[in-house]
Amino acid sequence: MRNWTNPPGAPQEVAVLLFPRFSNLCLANAVEPMRAANELLGREAYRWSFVTLDGAPVESSSGLPVLPHCPLRAHGGGDHLFVLASYDVRSHATPAAAKALSAAARRFGHVSGMDTGAWLLAQAGLLDGARATIHWAEMTAFSERFDTLETVPDRVVTCGNRTTSGGAMAAFDTVLEMIRAAHGEALGLEVSAFFLHRSAEIPVESGFRRGGAPLVEQAITLMSATIEAPLPIATLAARLQTTQRTLSRAFQADLGAAPKAVYVWLRLAAARRYAEQSEYSITEIALRCGYANAAAMTRAFVAQYGRPPRAFRH
């Protein structure tokens, strides 16, 4: 069963290893979810640094220069190493790179190959016997070149303490799962919503959680569309053509929380976005989030966030 919320822990240390002609989009999808998690938690849950093999500056495929913090060999290690390569990966797969990655892997708890980064992990012998994926354009060549592993056409594959993801968009999924594992499904949902719809209005799109149980996905979409007039859970289940008991079991298995708790969380997350981004009064925010009055919403808000809505005004 997934954890709806996890207790706070020490900040996680992440090194992002960049190779020439990396993808800007992949880098943003790797780093921005961590930044959003820090902002939503109100503390530094993730610390990241940029590294290269030799410590020299590196340019993305579109010419964006990045000045690394240090060479890979000088990084003391940490929780996660993101190996981020995109174009010309074969030219990066040198014996020196393989040696450096093999040594670095011993200093990090988890290693992720993003976009074409799986090629470099495989070259270093870090994926032997594992299941792995890579960008679709390299899938055939990858499977032919590395026969000591099982190549699969999935977006993200985790095997032990190795993760591979296929493409720039899948990097977001990789980091989001990392956030869920450390901080629970509630924060994962909020980070997803942060990027799906960052306006003062309520997100009603589906797709908060790729890979979740279809019934739970449908229920969350319906909950998000009925923030202002919340439905009884029995009515919600009926609209989804299921029973309340089946719905509750699905939520407990997939999120580790009851449907009612998730519904309340969605309403309060919407209230927080309104408080941060709109000029609505607290009373109007309460009405827009399904509360009869500001006092009732504020009590629930403080219980969830530890501070009243006014504390989130900018």
Image (spheres, grey):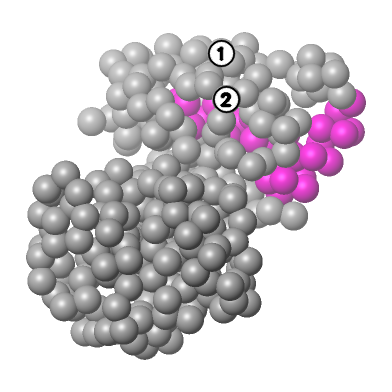
- Majority SS type along the magenta span: helix
Residue under label 1, please give it: 228
Q: Amino acid at mark 1?
A: Glu
Residue 196 vs 306, above or below: the answer is above
Residue 277 image offset from top left, x and y in percent: 30, 24
Residue 279 in sight from this viewpoint: yes
User: Real-space Cα distance between discs 2 and 1?
Assistant: 17 Å
Residue 75 vs 220, above or below: the answer is: below
The residue carrying mark 2 is 206
Quadrant in the picture for the N terminus: bottom right
Task: Judge from the rendering whether residue 310 lies leftward or rightward of residue 163; answer left or right.
Answer: left
- Mark 2 / mark 1, whichever is N-terminal: 2
Residue drawn at (58%, 38%) of the image = 209
Which element type, helix, strand or loop, lies under badge 1? Answer: loop
Q: Which region is colored magenta?
A: 243-271
**Circle 2: residue type:** Ser
